[in-house]
Structures are given as C-alpha cells and as structure tokens.
Amino acid sequence: MYYKLWLHDFRSPIQTGAKRVWDGSYPFTLPKVRLDRSESECARGWNFVEDLAHGIQVAGLWRDGHSSLITVVEPSKDAIQRGRKWRCSQLTILRPATGDEVRAGIVVFSVAFGEFGEQMAEEQVAWWTALS
C-alpha cells in the first residue's frame, strides 16, 4: 500500500505556493508528469511513500494549521524507489486513508519519542482528528 500526504485543500505540502492538483473526488488520476529517473531521493515526478511514518516525517501532520489529508494511492507502472521515497509519472488517488491506517502511521512515527512514544501518538491522533 502506498500513501501521499496533501494539505487540507488538495495542494502539495512541500511546494511553496503550489496550486490545487485535484478536486477531492475518488478515484482521481493525476496528470502525467516527467519522471526523473536519477538516483536523487527528491526529484521530479509524483512522490509518495510506502511507509506512512516516513511520509509524516517528510510532510508533517499540520503543515498549514489543518490536518494533512492522507490518501492511499496507486502508482503508474514506471514507479521507482529512491531511498525511502517513491515517485512515478502518474498517480491515482484511490481513497482517503482510514483512521486506523493514520493511527498506525502516527504510532510508528512516535517511536522516536522513546518512553513517551505511546502518549505522544495518542495526543497526535487526537489533534489530527480534531483539526480534520
């Protein structure tokens, strides 16, 4: 399963000033873009992750004061993995991630808080839910 994180208004959380790229409907196939096949971990193409905890680390849960929209996606056949990220020339947004999928990603992400990881995960899930 693969994930892509968005701002609440369907824009990229990474590209400053990015325009809305989809209308929130499911399924939705994003337009085809040029795919950079270099070894660079961050490069041109539709970027997505297999590990939701890593996606949370990269894109954040509240980049603009609203909860990130986390979606399950299906990449085109030209998908390539570089480091912990994936990219492809075209991506289909299948559905929003379920609450259980988001919770599982936040729990893994929160391991970094050591003995407070479980408590931090619960608080982050509560904030993510409230700000959604």
Image (spheres, rainbow, N blue to C red):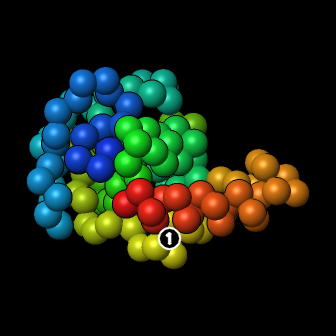
Q: Position of residue 28 (x, y in %)?
A: 15, 59
Which of the pair 28/61 is nearer the observer? 61
Q: Is residue 70 left or right of residue 119?
A: left
Tell me the residue at 25%/59% (across/down): 93
Q: Is residue 27 visible?
A: yes
Placement of the N terminus among the 4 image quadrants: bottom left
Which of the pair 129/4 is nearer the observer? 129
Q: Quadrant of residue 111?
A: bottom right
Q: Quadrant of residue 70?
A: bottom left
The residue most toward the right is 115
Q: Is residue 84 visible?
A: no
Q: Position of residue 131 (x, y in %)?
A: 41, 57
Tell me the residue at 71%/57% (across/down): 120
The amino acid marked with disc number 1 is Glu
Q: Position of residue 128 (x, y in %)?
A: 48, 59
Tell me the residue at 77%/48% (across/down): 112
Q: Position of residue 95 (x, y in %)?
A: 28, 68
Q: Secondary structure at mark 1?
A: helix
- The image shows a total of numbered marks equal to 1
Depicted 19 relative to depicted 24: above or below: above
Report crowding for label 1: few under 14, some 14 to 19, many 20 or more residues within 10 A (C-alpha): some
Query: Which residue bears the numbered disc 1?
Result: 101
Q: Is residue 41 left or right of residue 35?
A: right
Placement of the C terminus among the 4 image quadrants: bottom left
